[in-house]
Image (cartoon, rainbow, N blue to C red):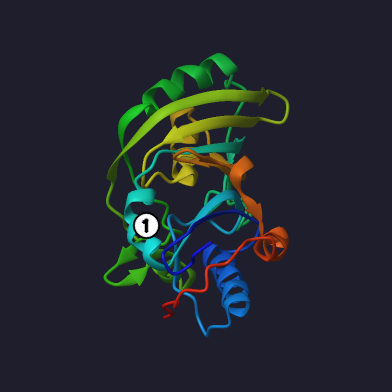
């Protein structure tokens, strides 16, 4: 492998690790292996710390492909808890409100989901990496400031109900969508459309373009994978 000419590496990001944290770990191991101070590397699309799954890393000249890779269709498997919300619409924060769920059926969910397929408008979560006057929205929220984000146009190709438990009100969905889709925001909006609430209890990105989780390397196994690769020792750019 020639990490200077550019390689694309697919990592299965672990739970409770930031995308940057996973990138930093890979960069450290690569840099040590190649005997350089700092390998040039970037990622093609952030995953929330509480999400797992496909994280695409690009090294060397392949970093020029990041925008292209970010535009690829993505697939997620999400578990939603219906009947409640949290400020971040995931497990980062405790439940802040509960709602009636007696009226929610699998049929009602299927009908509501039809409204979220195709080109839709979505307001990103206030706890997100979106910038407001140069500041990250989540930083402003954590400082107790109000955050208003504008709706964005995005594309959702498919939403499939994988499972629904009417007793626990847990809903599992497979979602195929375009760039910029926040699954936490989708959970929020589905909850509202059901005249209730919803937040994510689990999220896994299962595919980016043609790269699925079965093509990914776990972070724990990355050193072993790297040791098994034939390495080109051409001059390597760092940053």
Along the viewing direction, whichever of 121 and 189 lies nearer the viewer: 121
User: x, y (%) of residue 27?
Assistant: 55, 72
10 w.r.t. 231: above or below = above
User: x, y (%) of residue 60?
Assistant: 42, 68
29 w.r.t. 193: above or below = below
Tell me if I can see residue 146 in this picture: no
- Assign a secondary structure to mark 1: helix
Structural crowding at the residue carrying mark 1, measured as other residues with C-alpha within 10 Å and reported as few (<14), some (14–19) or many (≥20) = some
Q: In the picture provided, is 127 more to the left or to the right than 172?
A: left
Q: Residue at x 69, y 61 (%)?
A: 228
Q: In the picture provided, is 95 more to the left or to the right than 233?
A: right
Image quarter hosting the C terminus = bottom left
User: x, y (%) of residue 108?
Assistant: 52, 17
Q: Residue at x 44, y 40 (%)?
A: 209
For residue 104, which quarter of the picture?
Answer: top right
Along the viewing direction, whichever of 161 and 90 lies nearer the viewer: 161
235 w.r.t. 131: above or below = below
Report the number of numbered marks: 1
Q: Residue furthest top?
A: 107
User: x, y (%) of residue 187?
Assistant: 50, 39
Q: Residue at x 72, y 59 (%)?
A: 221
Q: Which residue is labeled 1 in the image?
A: 66
């Amino acid at each position: 492998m020639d990490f200077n000419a550019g390689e694309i590496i697919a990592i299965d990001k672990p739970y409770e690790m930031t995308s940057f944290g996973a990138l930093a770990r890979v960069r450290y191991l690569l840099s040590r292996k190649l005997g350089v101070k700092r390998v040039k590397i970037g990622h093609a699309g952030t995953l929330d710390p509480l999400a797992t799954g496909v994280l695409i890393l690009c090294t060397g000249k392949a970093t020029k492909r990041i925008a292209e890779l970010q535009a690829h269709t993505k697939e997620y498997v999400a578990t939603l808890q219906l009947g409640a919300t949290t400020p971040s619409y995931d497990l980062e924060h405790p439940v802040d409100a509960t709602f009636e769920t007696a009226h929610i059926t699998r049929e009602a969910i299927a009908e509501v989901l039809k409204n979220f397929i195709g080109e839709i408008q979505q307001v990103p979560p206030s706890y997100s990496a979106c910038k407001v006057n140069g500041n990250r929205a989540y930083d402003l929220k954590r400082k107790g400031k109000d955050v208003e984000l504008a709706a964005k146009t995005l594309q959702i190709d498919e939403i499939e109900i994988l499972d629904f438990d009417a007793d626990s009100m847990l809903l599992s969905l497979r979602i195929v969508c375009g760039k910029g889709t926040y699954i936490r925001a989708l959970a929020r909006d589905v909850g509202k459309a059901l005249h209730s609430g919803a937040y994510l209890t689990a999220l896994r990105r299962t595919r980016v373009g043609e790269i699925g989780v079965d093509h990914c390397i776990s972070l724990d196994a990355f050193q072993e994978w790297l040791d098994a690769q034939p390495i080109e020792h051409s001059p390597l750019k760092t940053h």
